[in-house]
Image (cartoon, rainbow, N blue to C red):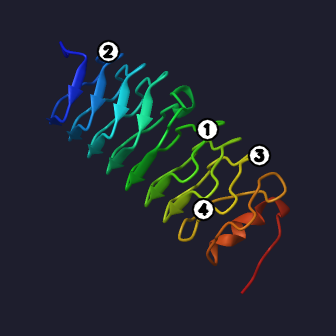
């Protein structure tokens, strides 16, 4: 367990924070490499300009946690409830991450980035995703319900099922053949 509550411009490498209570700690301009935060309590933690490389944050508690200008690279982040975090200034980039069964319910993810991520069963219900980039992501069983995807870019992403009548998709970008995911609700057969 850490003694100090404020950390600035530090590199944390190969540390097991698993099941620790790091609540209310502040990290600014820090980097975490190969750290394990699985099942940790990160409630009310402030993260500003922080990079996570090859970390495991699965099932961590992030109630009122602040994520401002955060980059996650090659991280495992299963079952995180981002909707419980502090939505003010929420700014994240996910590169090559696995976020299966995480939730972003009613969040503002405008201009966020998900690049080459596994997003199976992720809940994007009532989420603002305008101008968001979902590049080369697997969205199998992801939930889009009353979601704003206007001007979002989903080119290269696969396995999504989005109901155009229940979500806003004006000027969103999709690629062929994956765009067929907009017709799933009609249970029709499409042949080449």
Closer to viewer: mark 4 or mark 2 = 2
Separation (CA) of disc 4 from disc 3: 19 Å
- Sequence-wise first label, 4 or 2: 2
Which corner quadrant holds the N terminus?
Answer: top left
- For this view, does 188 lie left or right of residue 152? right
Residue 22 or residue 178, whichever sits in front = 22
Separation (CA) of disc 1 from disc 4: 22 Å
- Sequence-wise first label, 3 or 2: 2
- Sequence-wise first label, 1 or 2: 2
Residue 35 or residue 159, whichever sits in front = 35
- Sequence-wise first label, 1 or 3: 1
- Sequence-wise first label, 4 or 3: 3
Residue that mark 3 sits on: 146
Q: Secondary structure at mark 2?
A: loop
Residue 84 against residue 108 in the figure, above or below: above
Residue that mark 4 sits on: 159
Separation (CA) of disc 1 from disc 2: 25 Å
- For this view, does 37 lie left or right of residue 110? left
Q: Dot 1, how many residues are within 10 Å of its Cα: few (below 14), some (14-19), or many (20+)?
A: many
Residue drawn at 31 percent across, 24 percent down: 26
Residue 122: image x %, image y %?
Answer: 57, 44
Closer to viewer: mark 1 or mark 3 = 1
Residue that mark 2 sits on: 21
- Sequence-wise first label, 1 or 4: 1
Residue that mark 1 sits on: 107
Residue 73 against residue 39 in the figure, above or below: below
* Tag 4 and tag 2, C-beta contact below 8 Å: no
Separation (CA) of disc 3 from disc 2: 35 Å
């Amino acid at each position: 367990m850490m003694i100090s509550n404020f950390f600035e411009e530090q590199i944390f490498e190969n540390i097991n924070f698993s099941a620790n209570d790091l609540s209310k700690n502040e990290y600014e301009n820090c980097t975490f490499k190969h750290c394990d935060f699985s099942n940790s309590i990160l409630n009310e933690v402030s993260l500003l300009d922080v990079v996570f490389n090859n970390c495991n944050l699965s099932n961590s508690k992030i109630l009122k946690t602040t994520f401002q200008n955060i980059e996650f690279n090659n991280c495992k982040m299963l079952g995180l409830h981002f909707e419980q975090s502090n939505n003010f200034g929420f700014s994240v980039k996910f590169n090559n991450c696995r976020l299966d069964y995480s939730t972003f319910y009613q969040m503002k993810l405008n201009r966020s980035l998900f690049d080459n991520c596994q997003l199976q069963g992720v809940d994007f219900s009532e989420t603002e995703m305008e101008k968001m980039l979902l590049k080369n992501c697997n969205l199998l069983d992801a939930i889009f319900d009353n979601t704003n995807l206007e001007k979002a870019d989903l080119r290269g992403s696969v396995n999504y099922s989005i109901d155009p009548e229940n979500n806003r998709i004006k000027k969103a970008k999709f690629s062929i053949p994956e765009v067929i995911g907009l017709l799933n609700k009609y249970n029709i057969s499409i042949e080449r």
